[in-house]
Image (cartoon, grey):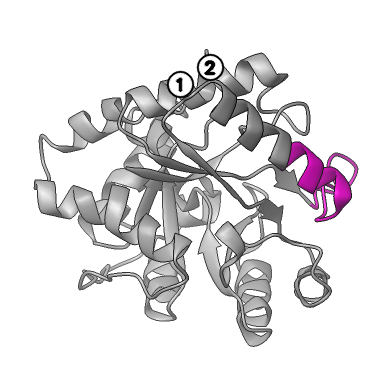
Amino acid sequence: MIDIHAHILPGIDDGAEDMYDTLEMARMAADSGVDRIIATPHCNIPGMYGNYFGREYIDRYESVVRAVRKEKIPIEILPGMEVFSTEDLPELIVNHKIMPLNQSRYILMEFAFDEDPEFADSILKRVEEVGARPVIAHAERYEFIQDYPQIAYRWFRKGYVIQANKGSFLGRFGGGPKRAADSLLRHNLISVIASDAHSPLQRTPYMMDVYEELSREYSENHLDVLFQYNPARICDNREILRLEPVPYSGRQQLY
């Protein structure tokens, strides 16, 4: 498996606190069958985290790569960021302040959970216009997606990549995100499932639990697309595989 969303760099955001946490998370991911993981610290959150691409990011990332190799943990750490979407995001991308997922054209983007969907649409369009491909982090956690999942269908049709968190399928963020995740997956709108790991204790990078949970309903081939094939295509800067989406009818289908 390949995990494209994990807060595994130490001491840079609300993820791994130190190198001990980082190495424990790397071991946990490897033990669950993950052989590549993209380090995606929070970036561009006003008043909280800057973490733009630069010397500090490079030094911290390279220190993790060295430590994982020294400990002989069988996992590859790749570079990336989870960038908070603001009006100036397209300019930040053009000015090379944002690290795409493994230096590809794919940008992992997040929004405020109560974001205005019109603003989200506008920023996604502008990001695409500067040559990047939006990967929408934990789409099922946004209130407007829970209320109007047709928005996710529209995003999918525009070519955006929708990523869901493993914890949502396991009910760890409450009923709303779980219902949304289950619904989006049934409608073939989710292209990647990732851990969004923050710790070796809670919100961990262990992926086998969600894989086994979803294997009760979905085929091995379907899950391999979500956990392996599409993440690999993103890492390699190639087009992902898109299943035929199932349209929504009516206002919403989650309740």
Badge 1 amino acid: Arg
* Mark 1 closeness class: few <14, some 14–19, many ≥20 residues within 10 Å: many
Nearest to the observer: residue 106 or residue 164: 106
The tag on residue 24 is: 2
In-image side of 16 versus 75 (left or right): right
Foreground: 78 or 124? Answer: 78
Badge 2: how crowded within 10 Å, few (<14), some, or many (20+)?
many
Q: Is residue 206 left or right of residue 250?
A: right
Q: Which mark is residue 27?
A: 1
- Whether residue 196 appears in magenta in the rendering, the answer is no
Q: Nearer the viewer, residue 41 or 75?
A: 75
Q: Position of residue 172 (x, y in %)?
A: 43, 25
Q: Is residue 88 above or below residue 6?
A: below
Q: Is residue 8 above or below residue 56?
A: above
Q: Residue at x 62, y 45 (%)?
A: 40
Residue 10: image quadrant is top right
Label 1–label 2 contact, CB within 8 A = yes
What kind of element bears circle 2? helix
Give the extent of the magenta segment: 44-61
Task: Tell me the element at label 1.
Answer: helix
Give the x, y percent position of residue 124: 61, 73
